[in-house]
Amino acid sequence: MTPEADARLKIDIQLKAAGWGIASRIIREEFHIPGSAYVAGEGDGSENIPDYVLTDPHEQPLAVVEAKHARRDPRNATRQASDYGDELREAFKLPFHPYLFLANGHETYFWHRPLYTPRRIAGFYTQADLERLRFLDTHRQPLDATPINERIIDRAYQHEAVRQITQRLTSGHRQFLLVLATGTGKTRVAIALIDVLLRARWAQRILFLADRRELVRQAIDACKEHLPGLAVSRIEEGKVDPAARIHIGTYPAMMAAYGQLSPGYYDLVIADESHRSIYSRYRTLLDHFDSLRLGLTATP
């Protein structure tokens, strides 16, 4: 078996694990883009067509998967994949930029244009993940024009914390650490941020992790008080309620559940008491999700 064929076989298995049926119409191999001109690809004389196109049930393109063999860095295909995405967007008149996966069977990178640069992920997104992301991209509103709910937080430093995070989100940052003194309302700041991201269509599904059951209870109570009408569910016994918008649980509870969830399942993960020992102990869990991440920690 050639290195190229071996890589495609591994990628096929990984796509199947994410729910993409190779024989179905929602995954198209060697996809011919309507109206695309012939372009020689990579100097080998081959036609310039995507290796895979992932579609929704109506056969509208969602994403491109560009496959390389294991000895090549998949990020070398960023320009090629970007061109495919642009051609698909034009051919199908898509209101968003198709998502790009760069893979070699061992590493997979995800490129969410135009917000972020390519980043390594733990596995392929599911169809539901991409459809949710398409909805967010199509309806996303400017964060700086989305007001903070003063019924959730009313102190100047709390507002400043939320605005600092939203400004950095707008400029392409994805990971944040919020450090506040004990008793100054870091949980409420996090809830105010959730509220802004939900209303601005930057997030739909959130995971809130805490290191103690008491903190989980407090977070659930705070969400129910300040985000009424929003479905909030506690993670217990390895079960995650798919109907809930916010899932809250301890790190150990989520360790028993995360393996059944895709890397793109959450839009935002909030890790309470996010100090070094917690991250080290649950790094596999935290690194599994390809999401915006907010760490919360308190000063003495």
Image: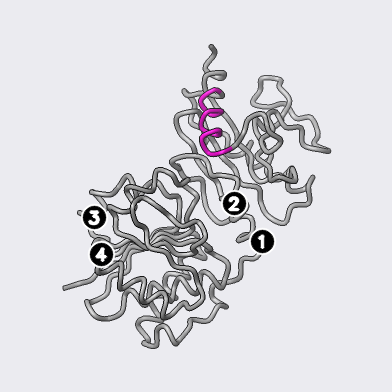
Question: Where does the image place residue 287, in percent across and percent down from the top left?
Answer: 37, 47
- Taking depth in this image into account, of 224 and 167 the one nearest to the observer is 224
Quadrant housing residue 81: top right
Question: Where does the image place residue 173, in percent across and percent down from the top left?
Answer: 45, 59
For the point 59% across and 56% down, the residue is 132
- Taking depth in this image into account, of 35 and 41 the one nearest to the observer is 35
Three-letter code, disc 3: Ile
**Residue positioned most to the front:** 237
Residue 199, placed above or below residue 94:
below
Q: CA distance from mark 3 to mark 4?
A: 15 Å
- Which label sits on residue 223? none
Three-letter code, disc 2: Arg
Question: Where does the image place residue 267, in percent across and percent down from the top left?
Answer: 49, 58
- Taking depth in this image into account, of 182 and 215 the one nearest to the observer is 215
Which callout, 3 or 2, points to the residue nearer the camera? 3
Q: CA distance from mark 1 to mark 4?
A: 37 Å
Task: Confirm whether the magenta stretch covers residue 17.
Answer: yes
- Which label sits on residue 278? 3
Task: Confirm whether the magenta stretch covers residue 219.
Answer: no
Magenta stretch?
9-19
Q: Which badge, 2 or 4, comes first in the chain's sequence? A: 2
- Which label sits on residue 138? 1
Q: CA distance from mark 1 to mark 2?
A: 13 Å
For the point 56% across and 44% down, the residue is 126
Indicate left or right for 252 with 64 as reference: left
Q: Which badge, 3 or 1, comes first in the chain's sequence? A: 1
